[in-house]
Amino acid sequence: MIRDITLGQYYPCESTVHRIDPRVKIIATVIYIVAVFIADDFIGIAAAALALTAVTALSRVPVKFIARGIKPIVLILLFTFLLNIFMLRGGEQLFSVGILTVTSGGLKKSFLLAFRLILIIWCSALLTLTTKPITLTDGLEAMLRPLQRFGVPAHDLAMMMTIALRFIPTLVEETDKIMKAQMSRGADFESGNILQRAKRLIPILVPLFISALRIAQDLAMAMESRCYRGGKGRTRLHIMKLKGRDFAAAGATLAFFVIIIAETHIL
């Protein structure tokens, strides 16, 4: 299950979504997440899911690959769903068990929250799957550049965020190696309840932490050996320019946002 995490990975492919400007994709992702939270009924969520399915089809990223990234959080989604069922109130009372009461409004809100989380993870994964890390860095830096006049280090922030995303797959792979090494020595991570399995994961944290520090040190030495000094005076091989497909993607995103707002207020 550890190797199923796809957030931060890049899926090389030739598609329209891959060729869209990273700035447009970042803004579209933010707008989509906002729209998902604005949608307060199943019609809006269904429209958001349909739109994301269409974008995924255009990206040519296999649906199985994205679904594999959602699998590790199924337990978290299930726990959140069950917790919200008994905590949220509203509508008619369906049934009660002791002090626990389930209402129609709470059930609806729980389903909506679970679908929102799935769509947000799906959308965020699609952003990293269709955007190269270096391109994502350039896009973030370009968007943060106006804040430089206020003393915000745009390049450093963009580089840190991109490195954090880039090393998620690396740390996942390192975790898988540590788990396999300990399993070969008799460790058992599969049997027992959730709490027991969580306690057995504690011995993994120390070697993983040491490995993360080693990777960070190697990266720092590699950057210093290449005379990396931040964004000052840095040139780029590819200059980002907005093209027709970028304006079309931006227009489609705005149209989707307007439709969600209209549907929410009308229905």
Image: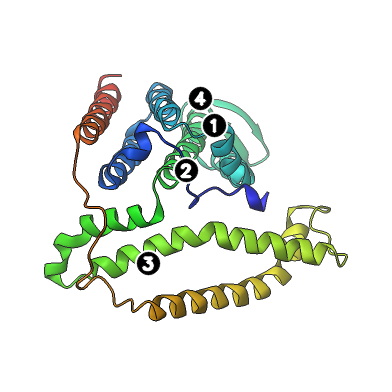
The mark tally for this picture is 4
Check whether the beta carbons of the residues at disc 2 and disc 3 lie within 8 A of each other. no
Residue 92 circle label: 4
Q: Residue at x 47, y 39 (%)?
A: 122
Q: Nearer the viewer, residue 86 or 93?
A: 86
Residue under pointer 1: 63
Please identify the quarter of the rendering in which residue 83 is found: top right
Disc 2 to disc 1, C-alpha distance: 15 Å
Examine the rendered structure and indicate whether residue 154 appears above or below residue 69: below
Q: Position of residue 68 (x, y in %)?
A: 60, 40
Q: Which numbered mark, 4 or 3, is in the foreground of this view?
A: 3
Of the residues under marks 2 and 1, which one precedes in the sequence? 2
Q: Quadrant of the C terminus?
A: top left
Expressed as whole percent of the image width and height from the top left, the position of residue 73 reads 59, 46
Which of marks 3 and 4 precedes in the sequence?
Answer: 4
Say what secondary structure mark 1 lies in. helix
Q: Measure the C-alpha gap from mark 4 to mark 2.
A: 50 Å
The numbered dot on residue 12 is 2
- From the viewer's perspective, is 218 left or right of 245? right
Residue beneath disc 3: 160
In this view, 28 is above or below 261: below
**Callout 2 secondary element:** loop
Image height of 42 relative to 118, above or below:
above
Q: CA distance from mark 2 to mark 3?
A: 23 Å
Mark 1 Cα within 10 Å, few/some/many (few <14, many 20+)?
few
First in sequence: mark 4 or mark 2? 2
Give the label, 2 or 3, closer to the camera: 2
Of the image marks 4 and 1, the number of the one nearer the N terminus: 1
11 horizontally vs 140: left or right: right
